[in-house]
Amino acid sequence: MKLRTQAAPDHLHNPVAIVGAGPAGLMLSHLLHLQGVESVVLEKQSRSEVESTVRAGILEQGTIDLLRKTGVGERLDREAEIDEGISVSIAGDSHRIDFAKYTGKQVAVYPQHEVLIDLIAQRLSDDGEIWFNTEVTAIDDHETDNPKVHYQAADGTSGVLSADFVIGADGSKSLTRKLITGAGGLRMKHEYPFAWFGIMVNAPQTAPELIYATHPAGFALISTRSEHVQRYYLQCDPEDTPDMWSDERIWEQLHLRADSDAVTVSEGEITDKAVLCFRSAVTDPMQRGRLFIAGDAAHTVPPTGAKCLNLAMADICALAPRLAHAVKKSDTSALDDYSKLALPRVWKTQHFSSWMSSMLHSVPGADQMSTQFQTNRRLAELSTVVTTDAGRQLLAQQYVGWDFPSIDSF
Ligand code: DHB
């Protein structure tokens, strides 16, 4: 097994250079390899940082199927919790959304870093090139047939990798995206007046399925990591900092917002506290010349529904077969369709994340009667969704996710 922790100066040209070893970058290099196309992944963080960063944990049916089909689903099948529904709690009144009944599909509770651990192990056992601790500092000539990636490794060495194609999978603070937005590409954005305070807890599971709870005091989400480790979120102000949330305040608010006759939130030692911001953004187009962007580099969704990783995987399913064809046949025509193919799904997912967020969170306003109007309207919408077959089906369909583009044909 070849483990590269930094750039190798002997590798000066590669068919595909991928910036970022997140879900999009690693899955792309894996799918290209399965199609007989090699790539280099450049990642500024160390392998252990990539494998330990806390992120969301829900895999759509399409992501589960993709991991299984491409030989990286074995640990997922052994360890992940498979859920066939969620509960939506409205001030303690619980409504189950039955995914199996409405869609025949499931979701897996399997955190992002576990997916990354599995993909890295697979890439390295396939002799794949991942250059950890290697920051991309600039990209140029991406509007020619021979783009260049300039990089600097943590030990100070630097170099230039030339490639036939460059893929920006470098996350929400993407450097690669700026080459598209700086050349006339659009970046459409939306900010939300709330955020989440996320905690990791050593405690037994509160309930067999996730609980999305709305309450006059704000939203709470009860999720899980394992039998002994739980992941909880509380709606908070975007300006909040972890020191404003004492353990006592956290437990008081979790019980207030998420307890019901049937459920009491389980308590334990809190091992991690962090504020997660709410933001939507979409870049259009997701390509320029021989540069293509995917995942968070191209778009960001608010965390409700945990769509980021799934959207990244769907982008890659659209990109990988077209890119493999372009490399093997020297024919880039199918790649021209990448943005057109990926963006409708991006917008549908933006809509879902934004819709779920707006139905579940309370928004304080200056005018009391106007705030009360908005709250009552929002709760009427949520109630319509969770108490009708049509509403439950609409929510279930979007939660388990839309079909992925085929990786076998285009
Ligand atoms: C988790 C995160 C989410 O945003 C969500 O909607 C469900 C679960 C999680 O981290 O477990």
Image (cartoon, helix red, strand yellow):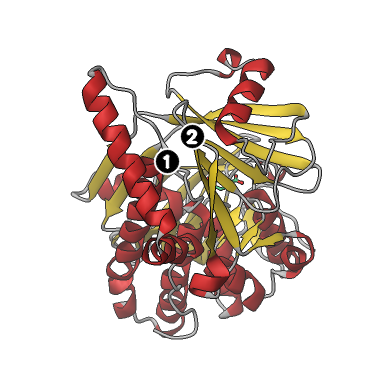
Residues at discs 1 and 2 in contact (Cβ within 8 Å): yes
Kindly identify the residue that appears in the image at 48 percent across and 34 percent down: 219
At label 1, which amino acid type do we have? Answer: Leu
Kindly identify the residue that appears in the image at 58 percent across and 24 percent down: 253
Indicate the secondary structure of the residue bearing disc 2. loop
- How far is disc 1 from disc 2 in space, using C-alphas? 6 Å
Badge 1: few (under 14), some or many (20 or more) residues near its Cα, within 10 Å?
many
Compare marks 1 and 2 and give the one earlier in the sequence. Answer: 2
Considering depth in this image, is 272 or 12 the residue closer to the camera?
Answer: 272
Residue 77: x, y in percent? 74, 68
Residue 298: x, y in percent? 37, 52
Task: Residue at the far left: name it.
Answer: 184
Assign the C terminus to one quadrant of the image: bottom left
Residue 302 lies left or right of residue 23; in this view the side is: left
Residue 134: x, y in percent? 59, 43
Above or below, comparing residue 227 to residue 395 in the picture: above
Residue 313: x, y in percent? 50, 63
Indicate the secondary structure of the residue bearing disc 1. helix
- Residue 256 image-quadrant placement: top right
- Residue 245 image-quadrant placement: top right
Question: Residue 262 got which mark?
Answer: none
Question: Residue 219 got which mark?
Answer: 2
Kindly identify the residue that appears in the image at 43 percent across and 19 percent down: 239
Read off the residue under disc 1.
360
Residue 127 lies left or right of residue 392; in this view the side is: right
Badge 2: few (under 14), some or many (20 or more) residues near its Cα, within 10 Å?
many
Assign the N terminus to one quadrant of the image: bottom right
Above or below, comparing residue 310 to residue 245 in the picture: below
Mark yes or no: residue 294 visible.
no
